């Protein structure tokens, strides 16, 4: 008896191909060709008739697909401290990917290392775009929405302190103008 693949893994793999094509603003067929995937294989994934093998997963990863999501259905989430101009900061869980973090700060991100395990994420073009003042932090005037996140190696991670710990370490973030 032939083993039936996990249909959800198959569909998530097919959906990642579509997401990557849309992100690059290219047709799905071009994306598949760039990844070395044929139309029949993608069709089989979409309909749950075949699961992506290690070679296909490697090609998907190379193209920027979220392999953890394909295999588990879970997005990598991190907890960050967010501050909008004129408001006190708050903790939030967010997806740990570039698009989500760009959406959080409203544009291209810039990171500033505050400690070995802590970074500030802000809008790279905040001053050029005339974003409103947010706060002063570590002697830096910041504009637009900002976030504090943890960092482990080259990956963002949970902010390495709780809400009260952040309030004690960075009291200037709670000043609302």
Image: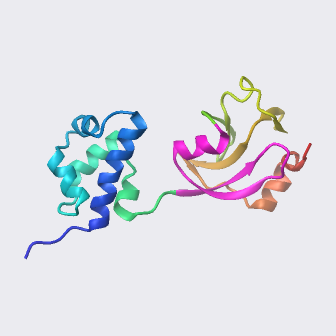
Is residue 154 in view?
no
Q: Please, which colouring scheme is shown?
A: rainbow
Residue at 9% of width from left, 72% of height from top?
2
Residue 2 colored in magenta in the image: no
Q: Quadrant of residue 160?
A: bottom right
**Residue located farthest toward the left when viewing the structure as drawn:** 1
The x, y position of residue 177, in whole percent, is 92, 42
Q: What residue do we see at 77% from left, 27% from top?
A: 130
Which quarter of the figure is the N terminus placed in? bottom left
Q: Residue at x 81, y 34 (%)?
A: 132
Give how far across and how far down residue 31 sits, in percent: 29, 37
The foreground one among 7 and 60 is 7
Region rendered in magenta: 77-106
Instruction: Tell me residue 60's x, y (percent).
Output: 30, 46
Q: Quadrant of residue 158?
A: bottom right
Q: Is residue 49 above or below residue 24?
A: below
Left or right, 31 with respect to 104, comes to left
Q: From the viewer's side, name the closer residue of 104 and 175.
A: 104
Residue 73 place in picture, x, y as percent = 40, 63
Q: Nearer the viewer, residue 90 or 160?
A: 90
Q: Is residue 95 visible?
A: yes
Residue at x-position 37% and y-position 42%: 20
Drawn side of residue 163 relative to residue 11, left or right: right
């Amino acid at each position: 008896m032939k083993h039936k693949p996990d249909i959800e893994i198959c569909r998530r793999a097919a959906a990642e191909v579509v997401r990557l094509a849309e992100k690059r603003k290219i047709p799905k067929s071009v994306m598949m060709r760039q990844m070395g995937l044929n139309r029949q294989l993608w069709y089989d994934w979409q309909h749950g008739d075949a699961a992506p093998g290690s070679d296909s997963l490697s090609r998907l990863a190379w193209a920027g697909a979220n392999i953890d999501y394909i295999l588990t259905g879970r997005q990598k989430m991190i907890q960050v401290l967010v501050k909008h101009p004129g408001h006190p900061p708050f903790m939030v869980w967010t997806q740990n990917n570039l698009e989500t973090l760009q959406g959080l700060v409203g544009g291209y991100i810039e990171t500033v290392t505050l400690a070995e395990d802590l970074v500030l994420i802000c809008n790279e073009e905040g001053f050029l775009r005339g974003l409103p003042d947010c706060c002063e932090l570590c002697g830096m005037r910041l504009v637009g929405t900002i976030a504090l996140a943890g960092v482990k190696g080259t990956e963002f991670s949970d902010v390495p302190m709780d809400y009260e710990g952040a309030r004690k370490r960075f009291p200037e973030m709670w000043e609302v103008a």
